[in-house]
Image: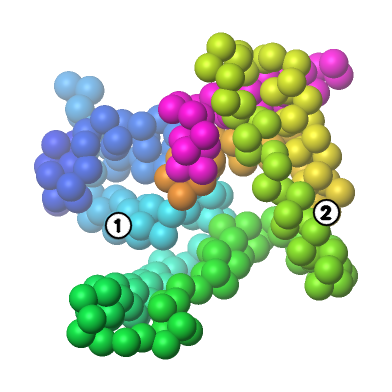
């Protein structure tokens, strides 16, 4: 059965503009194009779009989805089983967080008294480690980062984490008149690039550029810059792109 672009958009709850963009980047090509120039999709396209939306639900960037789904050994059934596990884990964690919220409200109202540790039930920073493995586990950067991090002492790890906190404000800058190519901004990005290379992995300019794109696409990262200044995520992405362009030209 053939579906028009509007029909598949309505079925999936996405916009036709999104589907055209997926076609443009080779993420979801239509099954065919009619003599009238209209795109037509089949059931295989529906299953592929479902996969894309599952990955997006797990906050995987489009570039990574394309890379994953383009692999010769990509297995639809295996991917679905992984999605099911990830979503069940998320549902379980959200249930715990909702329970923590309910109990905290009851505690504030004087209806219950929570122990200190119970205030933080459901919060789990290790979830980001698993997400990182899913996103970048196939890359040499991930393997190098894992090796380096395992080699640090507890004190070194704490120092590295503390050092990372100083970069966000300097890269985005609270100066409303600053431009992405201002020397101070570019210097901060250069230091952050060196920091990544020193403590985590070999970060070439294209990988750095992709990181900056992710900071805008993923609201969990974007909000860190938006807290500093409105439009901060877009500002730092533009600044990083300028830095990468200059590095590529050898400036």
Decide: is 134 above or below 77.
Answer: above
x and y percentages locating residue 246 in the rendered image: 77, 18
From the viewer's perspective, is 64 left or right of 196? left
**Residues drawn in magenta:** 223-251
Instruction: Give the residue number, with chain letter if any, for mark 2.
Output: 199
Task: First in sequence, mark 2 or 1: give its number.
Answer: 1
- State the residue in front, 93 or 16: 93
CB atoms at circles 2 and 1 under 8 Å apart? no
Asked whether residue 241 is drawn in magenta, I would say yes
Instruction: Give the residue number, with chain letter if any, for mark 1.
Output: 50
Residue in view at x 25 percent, y 53 percent: 46
Q: Residues within 10 Å of mark 1 (few under 14, many from 20)?
A: some
Decide: is 88 above or below 27.
Answer: below
- State the residue in front, 231 or 54: 231
x and y percentages locating residue 17 in the rendered image: 26, 30
SS for callout 1: helix
**Can see residue 73?**
no
Residue in view at x 29 percent, y 42 percent: 31
Q: Distance between the residues labelled 2 and 1?
A: 37 Å
Q: Quadrant of residue 109?
A: bottom left
Residue in view at x 86 percent, y 49 percent: 198
Of the residues tagged 2 and 1, which is closer to the observer?
2
């Amino acid at each position: 059965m053939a579906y028009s672009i509007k029909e598949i958009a309505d079925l999936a709850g996405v916009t036709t503009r999104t589907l055209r963009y997926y076609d443009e980047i080779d993420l979801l090509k239509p099954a065919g194009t009619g003599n009238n120039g209209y795109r037509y999709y089949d059931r295989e396209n529906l299953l592929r779009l479902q996969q894309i939306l599952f990955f997006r639900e797990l906050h995987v960037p489009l570039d990574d989805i394309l890379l994953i789904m383009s692999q010769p050994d990509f297995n639809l059934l295996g991917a679905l089983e992984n999605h099911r596990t990830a979503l069940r884990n998320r549902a379980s964690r959200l249930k715990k967080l909702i329970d923590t919220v309910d109990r905290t409200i009851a505690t504030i109202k004087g209806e219950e008294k929570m122990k200190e540790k119970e205030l933080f039930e459901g919060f789990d920073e290790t979830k980001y480690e698993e997400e990182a493995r899913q996103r970048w586990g196939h890359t040499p950067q991930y393997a190098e980062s894992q090796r380096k991090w395992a080699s640090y002492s507890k004190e070194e790890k704490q120092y590295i984490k503390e050092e990372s906190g100083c970069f966000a404000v300097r890269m985005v800058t609270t100066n409303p008149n600053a431009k992405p190519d201002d020397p101070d901004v570019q210097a901060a990005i250069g230091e952050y690039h060196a920091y990544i290379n020193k403590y985590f992995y070999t970060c070439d300019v294209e990988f750095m550029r992709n990181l900056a794109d992710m900071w805008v696409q993923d609201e969990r990262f974007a909000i860190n810059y938006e807290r500093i200044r409105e439009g901060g995520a877009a500002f730092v992405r533009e600044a990083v792109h300028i830095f990468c362009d200059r590095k590529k030209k050898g400036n």
